[in-house]
Amino acid sequence: MKIEIKIPDIAENVKTGIISRLLVSEGDHVNKDQPVAEVETDKATTDIPSNYEGDVSEIRVEEGDEVEVGQVIMVLEGEGKEGKEGKEEEEKEKEEEKEGKEEEKEEEKEEEKESEKESDKAEKNDKEKKEEKQEEQGKREEDQKGEEKEKQTQEQDKEEEKEDSENDEKEPKEIAASPLARRLAREHDIDLRTVEGSGPGGRITRDDILEQSKTGKDKPRKESRKDETELPDFSQWGHIEKVTMDNIRKLTASKMADSWRKIPHVTQFDEADVTDLEKFIKENEGEYREKGSKLTITSILLKLSAFALLRFQRFNSSLDEENNQIILKKYCNIGVAVDTEQGLLVPIIKDVDKKPLIKLANELSELAEKARNKKISPDELQGGNFTISNLGGIGGISFTPIVYSPQVAILGVSKSRHRPVYITEEFEKRLILPLSLSYDHRVIDGAEAARFLRWMCEVLENPFFIFQ
């Protein structure tokens, strides 16, 4: 029996990956759940296990090949599912076959009954035909009126095309499109380069623009755009070195470009006085260390972000463009960006709102270590509602993080610095933490984002504010 091994659903929003390593060869015997290949995605390197036992008869991919979810990568010769499971499935198949035959017999009987009814209806049809002739005459008259209306609308369209022809100079001339299509594209804020024309020679018509305005999705044109992507020969000005992007970097670049292209980003900036919070961390870090954990500003931000997501529900949502809905989530799964040798990974900590701070600190340390050692599982990289990116350990005053689609917001954390702050008629040395909140402006308004980030800052400065 031939058994196909396919690429499983690896992680959320991951449709493709790269075969980084084949772990078996043709002729090898494979046990159930044994890894047969490694696949690199923009999130992690994942082992692909075999769901069955058998001998490898064919390998359909090579190392470095790009594969899609559901694609067959190799074929085994085996017995498939064994024991009780296999027998139960065979019995179910036999029962389904019997039920299918019985249904066929019943359908034949019903067809015989229907044929008898049809003969009875034949007489009635003669009377109905006379009535239909009268109806047809009425319809013809209506069709004639409809044709006259269509002619009028066509004449109006022609007049509009003449009026809009003067505006064509603003649009790219290399794109074949009617003047009316160009006007509609401007009205709906659609880039003609993203529309695939259905007219002769790929010409863009009015219907193409209206269809794209309904779906809200860009359709890439088949025509090449070398003039926009082709680079000059930099070696003419000096010595250069070309470094090939690894698979993780290529997939990350694609994902980030897609998020930036789809989401209208806005970033809100604010600062929190964390002088007292820093004292709390220093006073309690010994206790946390004894319990095998590490108390950090990131673990504290994890907990506070969960409270903020419950308070400001729009930040704990996703946008369903196809159905024009905002999906509000009633759980708090938060990702934390981790810098690794293979690129940026974002492990997800589940149910943050239900866990104590010390448990969150433990999970954060464990997942970060797994990510750096390439031992993190796909399940630990998906399901996030919100993301925290902390660059404070490296430096910088502020930055604008990119929202990770289908999330709608991300919190950026920069390096805290001591600054003189005017308090009670004199300056005091205070530790100031810069925060950056990027958000999807289709879902979140600026005032709401300002309130969210201000609330976070006030809780960092005074934890009792959380009860207000």
Image: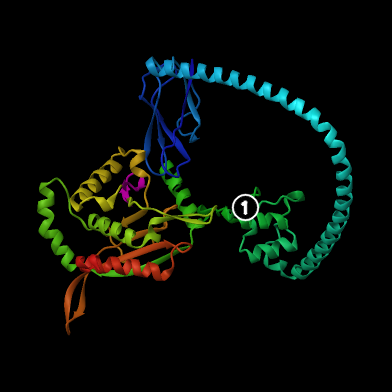
Q: Which residue carries the number 1 mark? A: 225
Q: Quadrant of residue 206?
A: bottom right
Q: Can you give x and y, in whole percent of width and height, for residue 170 in the image?
A: 68, 67
Horizontal side of 57 relative to 148 (left or right) equals: left
Q: Is residue 85 magenta?
A: no
Figure check: 457 above or below 108: below
Give the quadrant of the C terminus. bottom left
Viewer-closest of 301 and 318 = 318
Q: Could you tell me which residue is drawn at 84 percent across and 36 percent down?
A: 125
Can you say whether 107 is above or below 283 in the image?
above
Asked whether residue 57 appears in the rendered view, the answer is: no
Amino acid type, label 1: Arg
Identified at 63% across, 55% down, the residue is: 212
Is residue 313 visible from the viewing direction of this image? yes
Of residue 231 and residue 377, the one placed in the foreground of this image is: 377
Q: Give percent across and percent down for residue 96.
A: 53, 20
- Disc 1 on helix, strand or loop? loop
CA neighbours of label 1 inside 10 A, class few (<14), some (14 to 19), many (20+) = few
Query: Residue 345 colored magenta?
Result: yes
Magenta-drawn segment: 335-349
Q: Is residue 122 above or below residue 268?
A: above
Give the camera-side residue of 21 and 337: 337
Decide whether the magenta segment is chiefly helix, strand or loop. strand
